[in-house]
Amino acid sequence: MENLGIEGKLLLAQIINFVLFFILVKQFIVKPFTAFLNQERKNEEEKNRMLEKLKKSEEAGMEAEKKMKEKMKKEFDTLFVQAKKEAQDMRADLMKQAEADALEIKAKNSKLMEEEKNLLYREVKDKIIKTSLMIVESTLKESLDESARKKITGTIIKNYEGKVNFN
């Protein structure tokens, strides 16, 4: 090899230097760098898994929120229909009560008017009787004595009470 211009000792020293350099680079540079790259890859995968989980969780949350809104809308619609029905029932009850009150007031007024009418008829009847008695007394006073006048007046009163009926 010396004919080729290669020295054996120098070649051996370079091979030893290369092996030492290879071992040192592998031990102190390649291994930590590979571990760092593996850790970064694992971190990236974990981040991607967590993002997927978060997306799924967010989608599930949105779906749950949508279902909750639909459920609340259905409940609101149900409560609205129920309140409307209750209001209509209450209105019908109030109308019935008002009609019953109106009929009661009308009956009371009719009864009161009937009583006032009877009272008025009695007053008119009494006035007619008194007026008739005054006319008869003044007419008969001159021609009859006291006992005959009383007898005729009693007969007239009995006849008016039996015949005069304003009802």
Image (cartoon, helix red, strand yellow):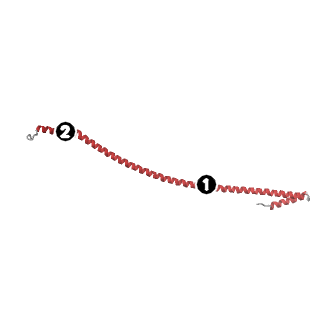
Where residue 81 appears, as percent x and y from the top left, is 52, 55
Q: Label 2, on which residue?
A: 21
Q: Secondary structure at mark 2?
A: helix
Describe residue 11's horizontal placement relative to residue 38 as left or right. left
Where residue 152 appears, as percent x and y from the top left, is 87, 60
Front of the two marks 2 and 1: 2
Q: Nearer the viewer, residue 56 or 153?
A: 56
- Residue drawn at 19 percent across, 38 percent down: 21
The N terminus sits in image quarter: top left
Describe residue 72's horizontal placement relative to residue 163 as left or right. left
Q: Amino acid at mark 1?
A: Leu
Q: Nearer the viewer, residue 72 or 126?
A: 72
Q: Label 1, on which residue?
A: 94
Q: Nearer the viewer, residue 150 or 129?
A: 129
Considering only vertical position in the picture, is 104 above or below 2? below
Q: Quadrant of residue 130?
A: bottom right
Where residue 143 appears, as percent x and y from the top left, is 91, 59
Crowd rating for badge 2 (residues with CA inside 10 Å; few <14, some 14–19, many 20+): few
Q: Secondary structure at mark 1?
A: helix
Considering only vertical position in the picture, is 123 above or below 54? below
Q: Amino acid at mark 2?
A: Phe
